[in-house]
């Protein structure tokens, strides 16, 4: 059996690269969304991601079958993953990248809330205060009553909620389900559902656009592998906050490729949400604070499609 060397610096670097891959993935999604339906983009992105993922799963000799131990919960998580994925992709196509990230970053706070009834997690005053402050940050970004709330805003919030629920579900069943099961079923169900929509939304693609959709699939696989490797090399409390680096990439990509500049309220709201999320991560990393650490173990997920990183 091979041993893994713990190196926070290496883990941080690998995780940072993984989240950079995800940010690049989202920028490409936004570009393609100007011409193609979200359902078509997701179908082909999943199709191209399925190829390398299936090869890796088949090469893993520890996986002797793909039968889930908890079929209903695996199916429920897969359905939540599709909702999170579809809404997240749509939000990226119609809203500025940084604004979408600021709303999606509410997911760790929602995980804390959902973990109470589903996992039996005990959340005390300090984490509750962080959740409330973080949700105030969401309101700062949305500014209800002063700006028009669009379908894109609703999609981003829905994606955060669905992703949080799916992450909590996978924390509940993760010890009983193999990683291959947690990867395979959401991908297959996503391709089936999105494939069913293709007759009504399909638009012929240029070779360049097809290559970009293939790039989405491979970037998502590379990002998942990098982030999971980061968790294996460094403590979860060190790696988890690196997710927020995506907003830096979003600002850069938005400015140079989409002529986007986050306004003052998005900047303030994002800072409040990120600060609250980092506080929750810090609290969970302390002993005798969280039994299951649902937030710490959710940051390797991407719209709840990838499995949580393994425990050391």
Image (spheres, rainbow, N blue to C red):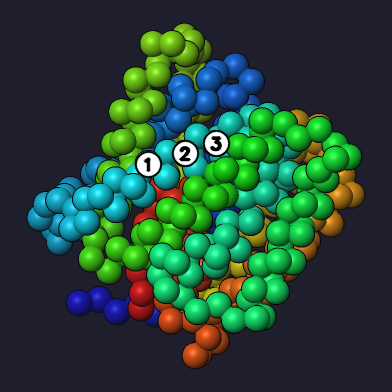
Disc 2 from disc 3: Cα separation:
6 Å
**In the rendered view of the protein, which quadrant contains the N terminus?**
bottom left
Q: Which residue is mark 2?
A: 83
Between discs 3 and 1, the one toward the N terminus: 1
Q: Which residue is mark 1?
A: 79
- Can residue 92 be seen in this snapshot? no
Q: Quadrant of residue 308?
A: bottom left
Camera-side residue of 74 and 271: 74
Q: Secondary structure at mark 1?
A: helix
Q: Quadrant of residue 137?
A: bottom right
Q: Which residue is mark 3?
A: 87
Disc 3 from disc 1: Cα separation:
12 Å
Q: Quadrant of residue 198?
A: top left
Q: Residue at x 36, y 49 (%)?
A: 77
Q: Are marks 2 and 3 in contact (CB under 8 Å)?
A: yes
Q: Are marks 1 and 2 in contact (CB under 8 Å)?
A: yes
Q: Residue at x 35, y 78 (%)?
A: 312
Q: Are marks 3 and 1 in contact (CB under 8 Å)?
A: no
């Amino acid at each position: 059996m091979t041993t893994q060397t713990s190196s926070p610096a290496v883990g941080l670097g690998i995780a940072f690269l993984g989240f950079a891959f995800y940010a690049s993935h989202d920028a490409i999604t936004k570009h393609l969304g100007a011409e193609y339906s979200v359902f078509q983009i997701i179908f082909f992105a999943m199709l191209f991601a399925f190829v390398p993922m299936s090869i890796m799963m088949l090469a893993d000799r520890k996986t002797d079958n793909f039968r889930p131990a908890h079929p209903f919960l695996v199916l429920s998580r897969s359905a939540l993953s599709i909702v999170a994925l579809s809404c997240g992709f749509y939000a990226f196509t119609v809203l500025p990248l940084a604004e979408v990230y600021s709303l999606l970053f509410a997911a760790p706070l929602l995980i804390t809330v959902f973990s109470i009834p589903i996992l039996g997690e005990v959340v005390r005053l300090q984490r509750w205060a962080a959740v409330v402050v973080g949700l105030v940050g969401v309101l700062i970004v949305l500014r209800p009553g002063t700006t028009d709330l669009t379908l894109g805003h609703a999609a981003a919030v829905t994606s955060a909620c669905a992703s949080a629920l799916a992450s909590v579900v996978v924390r509940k069943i993760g010890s009983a389900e193999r990683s291959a099961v947690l990867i395979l079923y959401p991908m297959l169900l996503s391709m089936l559902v999105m494939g069913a929509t293709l007759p009504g939304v399909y638009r012929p693609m240029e070779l360049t656009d097809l290559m970009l959709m293939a790039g989405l699939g491979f970037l998502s696989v590379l990002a998942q592998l990098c982030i999971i490797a980061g968790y294996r090399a460094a403590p979860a409390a060190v790696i988890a906050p690196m997710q927020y680096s995506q907003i830096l990439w979003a600002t850069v990509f938005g400015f140079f490729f989409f002529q986007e500049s986050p306004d003052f309220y998005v900047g303030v709201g994002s800072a409040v949400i990120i600060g609250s999320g980092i506080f929750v991560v810090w609290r969970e990393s302390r002993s005798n604070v969280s039994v299951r650490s649902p937030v710490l173990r959710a940051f390797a997920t991407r719209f709840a499609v990838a499995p949580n990183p393994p425990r050391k």
